[in-house]
Structure formats: C-alpha cells, structure tokens
C-alpha cells in the first residue's frame, strides 16, 4: 500500500492517517494550552509533553508555535464562515440580528478555546499576525453579508470603520463572556447590548452622533 501525502495547514506534509491524527492532536493540545496559559508562556516542549510525543516528532509537523497558532486561526475561520453566511443581509431586522447572535453564541460555546485565543491576542498592544489576519477575514466576511460593513470599508469612512471595528470588538467579548458563563444574567445582558450596537451600526444610526 502506497503512502499518500496529506497537507494539513502546515507547510510540512503529513504522510499517513496516523500522522494526520498526530497533527490534529498537536493542534488541539496546543489550543488548550494557549487557552489555559496564554500564548506567550507556552513552549514547544510543553506542547510536545502534553501531546505525549517527542519534541522531534512535534517539529516534523510544525516549525514553531506561531505556525500552530496560524493553523488554529485558519481552522477556526473555516468553521466560522458558514455561520457568518447565515447572517441575513444586506439590511437585517433587529430580530434577525438577535437570532444570528444566538447562533454565534452556540458556535462560540463549541469553539471556546480558539475564540478566546484570537479575541485576546487581537487586543494586545502588538496584535499577533494570526489574530490580525483573522480580524481582517472576519471584517471581509461581514462585509459580504451587510451593506453597512461594505460601506465602512470604503476609503474616506473613518467613523464608519471605527464603528465597524468597535461593534465586532463588543460582540467578540460578549460572546466569550457568554461562553464562560451562559447562565449568567450579566452574560446575557452583554449579548443584548452587543446586538443593540450591531443593530445600530447596521442602521448607520451612529451618523447622528456618539452613543
């Protein structure tokens, strides 16, 4: 039986089903460590130990933890795209937005680690490239569904663009908070506030002045 080369996100090939399973386990273990400890403190040695493999095996799959994070981001973006595609557009009602935010809350609950890693890294003074790439892709996905986001990405729209980014920031943190404590009244209220901000942005109500 001939081996079939599989490329799974990394620039390095994984050559058999067992290798593919190891590759996936490394990514999942790394995501758990990044989520629990933060991205910066985690070392490749700790990832190898947690995955139950030798460090040499780890380096057959990933050159460094930056490459692991990039693949986590790519995988998360791939899973998120169909959720964003379910967002009614181009000018959804408040009820439609609220239903979609609930849909997002379910998704984030199932992808909590990757969500919190990317949201947290996107708010560092020096935004991590993987988080920055995710943010750009999310903005493009939203622009593909909502007219207000498309207009905000046009040149010469600094206020609209600032609202777009701030709206996504508010939604991201509200979703993370809800995933941590789904039964909390505060968590539910934060989702409601994020929905109100999204609705106001979609209606471009911000043009009348600050909140």
Image: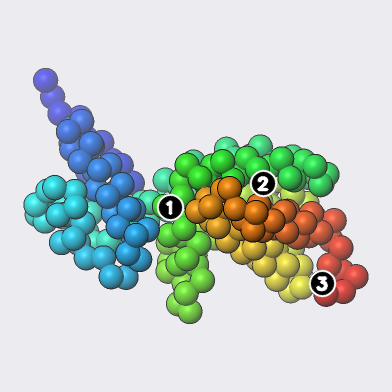
When the figure is inspected, residue 75 is found, relative to residue 5, above or below; the finding is below
> What is the count of numbered marks?
3
Residue 52 place in picture, x, y as percent = 13, 47
Regarding residue 148, the answer to whether it shows in the image is no
- Point out which mark residue 101 bears: 2
Q: Are marks 3 and 1 in contact (CB under 8 Å)?
A: no
Quadrant in which residue 69 is drawn: bottom left
Task: Please give the residue where the numbered disc 1 appears in the rendered image.
Answer: 114
**Residues at badges 3 and 2 in contact (C-beta under 8 Å)?**
no
Q: Which residue is mark 3?
A: 211
In terms of secondary structure, where does tag 2 sit?
Answer: helix
Q: Which mark is residue 177?
A: none
Mark 3 or mark 2: which comes first in sequence? 2
Q: Earlier in the sequence, mark 1 or mark 2?
A: 2
The residue lying at 34 percent from left, 53 percent from top is: 31
What secondary structure is marked by label 1? Answer: helix
């Amino acid at each position: 039986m001939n081996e079939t080369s599989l490329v799974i996100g990394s620039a390095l090939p994984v050559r058999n089903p067992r290798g593919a399973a190891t590759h996936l386990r490394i990514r999942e273990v790394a995501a758990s460590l990044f989520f629990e400890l933060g991205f910066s403190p985690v070392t490749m040695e700790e990832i190898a130990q947690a995955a139950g493999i030798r460090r040499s095996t780890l380096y057959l799959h990933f050159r460094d933890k930056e490459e692991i994070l990039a693949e986590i981001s790519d995988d998360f973006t791939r899973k998120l795209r169909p959720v964003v595609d379910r967002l009614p557009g181009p000018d959804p009602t408040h009820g439609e937005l609220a239903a979609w935010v609930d849909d997002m809350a379910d998704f984030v609950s199932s992808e909590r680690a990757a969500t919190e890693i990317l949201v947290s890294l996107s708010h560092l003074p020096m935004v991590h490239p993987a988080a920055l790439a995710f943010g750009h892709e999310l903005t493009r996905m939203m622009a593909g569904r909502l007219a207000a986001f498309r207009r905000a990405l046009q040149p010469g729209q600094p206020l609209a663009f600032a609202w777009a980014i701030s709206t996504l920031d508010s939604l991201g943190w509200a979703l993370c908070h809800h995933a941590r404590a789904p039964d909390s009244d505060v968590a539910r209220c934060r989702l409601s506030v994020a929905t109100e901000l999204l609705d106001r942005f979609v209606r471009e109500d911000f043009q009348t002045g600050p909140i």
